[in-house]
Amino acid sequence: MTLRTKKKAVAIVLALWVFGHPPSLFAQGPEALYRDLCAQCHGRDRTGGLGPALLPESVERLRLPNVVDVIAKGRLATQMPAFAGQLTPEQITSLAQWLKTAPAEIPEFTLATMRATHWSKPVLPLDGPKDGGDRWNRFVVVEQGDHHLTVLDGERFQVLARLRTHYAVHGGPKFSPDGRFVTVASRDGWVEKFDLWALEKVAEIRVAVNTRNVAVSSDGCYVAVANTLPETLVILDSNLAPIKILPGQSLDRKEHSRLSAVYDAPPRKSFIVAFKEMPELWEVSYDEAAEPVFDGLVHDHKMAEGLAVPGFLHPKRTRLPAVLDDFFFAPGYRNLIGASRSGESFVVNLDVRQAIASLPLEGMPHLGSGITFEYAGRRVMATTNLRRAELSVIDLDRWALVKSVPLCGPGFFVRSHEKSRYLFVDSMMAPNCRDTLTVIDKTTLEVVKTLRPKPGKTFAHVEFTADGRYALASVMEPAPDGALLVIDTESLEVVREIPAHKPIGKYNAWNKVHRSEGTSW
Ligand code: DHE
């Protein structure tokens, strides 16, 4: 081909490309591109619709090159198309950069706007699961690859149903006391409730642009949702209808903060709430007969006399030595162990409402994933550390370190079961050994085996069957596919592989409702 014919060919290709596109696209800045190409699915105000929200808070977990990649290539197994043929690389980059900037206005989330997104349907009168299976030994598996909840029979490991969820469900699903219903929150502020006996969705509502997690009260009557945008705790009833919004503000309103998490504390009949920027911890009682609370901090009691407000669904505030990044309830729910981002770990007593001890944990403990068990006649808790390749075991009476068990890399989740002698630790965030599961003997605190059934593939998050006989672990790659591996907890052999779409967490109804000592709350 001569240089002249080459130039001609290039000109023809360019002309075809140019004429194949709406002329307006060439001149458009990112805002107009968004309006023309993205708004229909992601919402005019970027708060989501068919597709997920595209605000800085929603895409903060994706680095710029990943956002560019998704716009250019689309997303497998979703309706997100590839725009590489339609936009220039510069336009794609400017659109990705623009998505990381805050919009002029964030929509308000009032009780009325929430109500407009709410629906629920009557619950079918059933004595047990429609499929005839065991009502307790069933798992809910969160599949991130195609945004589904899989309901899995824990006896035969059969998939009973795959139920579509909103985009990016995160955190543990929360079960009703009878194990029949499960409530989940998506990162985009949707809360959904599923019936595990009728195998269908029964309610949903949108409460925020960006949500952290959800808690269900031990009596099943209330749901609390912790949000980062807006900074609110939203209380819903059991059908997910909104009841109350508590703004994440200090009493004098001088401080405000994104919420970091909310958990149920059953013996206290209350929700415990932590914040990302405010050194405060709230206890919000869902007991209608709760004592009035002084709308002040504990040392303000005297000052606040006469300002007592009803205790029901009202925050009781505890001032902390530092912002809590992560925490763990000690058995009995009187004390919690907290860790701050700056590396301090301390014990907070929820009755006297102050820190009562400090702890020697310096490797950034991942306390939310900790578990407790008996070791040498004492109750201990085990936690992984995000910055240290060791499992820390703490004596819960003396608040002292019992042992540091060395791991191949920093661990992430630790799980066990009261009927198993082993605990399992994954290292899903450790580049050198994210394909391993370390098995530790609870009676000796020694590593007995390192499982690597799928070399090179990320292995994560374990949950046991109700009888503790098997442990299910996630193989998260190759995305969007993956599998659940069923491990015999005595022989430590993989006995079954169940295909799944990038499964993350899995949760057993019996273990969760009965608060098995080896699982998360
Ligand atoms: Fe999670 C639980 C916070 C990133 C998978 N994660 C939780 C909880 C909190 C939390 C507060 C407890 C909520 C509950 O169960 O009610 N997670 C955070 C973060 O701050 C962090 C580091 C950053 C963020 O993006 O929010 C984070 N988490 C991740 C992931 O990247 C993971 C691996 C994949 C995902 O889904 O995004 C992930 N988080 C999980 C899982 C649980 C969880 C599987 C539930 C564990 C359990 O057994 O209960």
Image (tube, rainbow, N blue to C red):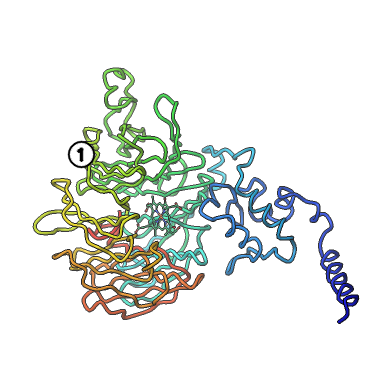
Q: Ligand 1: give its quadrant.
A: bottom left
Q: Is the residue at mark 1 in contact range of ligand 1, meaning its CB lies under 8 Å from it?
A: no
Determine the residue positioned at 74% across, 60% down. Answer: 88
Q: Position of residue 111 (x, y in %)?
A: 51, 38
Label 1 CA crowd tier, 10 Å (few <14, some 14–19, many 20+): some
Q: Which residue is mark 1?
A: 357
User: Observer-nearest residue: 475 or 52?
Assistant: 475
Relative to 246, residue 65 above or below:
below
User: Observer-nearest residue: 14 or 21?
Assistant: 14
Residue 322: name its quadrant: top left
Determine the residue positioned at 57% across, 69% down. Answer: 77
Relative to 212, residue 137 above or below:
below
User: Observer-nearest residue: 413 or 416?
Assistant: 413
Relative to 44, residue 353 above or below:
above
User: On the rendered image, what quadrant is the N terminus found in?
Assistant: bottom right
Name which residue type carries label 1.
Answer: Ala
Q: Position of residue 204 (x, y in %)?
A: 49, 52
Determine the residue positioned at 84% across, 67% down. Answer: 14
Relative to 301, residue 89 above or below:
below
Residue 424: name its quadrant: bottom left
Q: How many marks?
A: 1
Q: Position of residue 432 (x, y in %)?
A: 38, 67
Q: Position of residue 461 (x, y in %)?
A: 35, 64
Determine the residue positioned at 51% across, 39% down. Answer: 230
What kind of element bears circle 1? strand
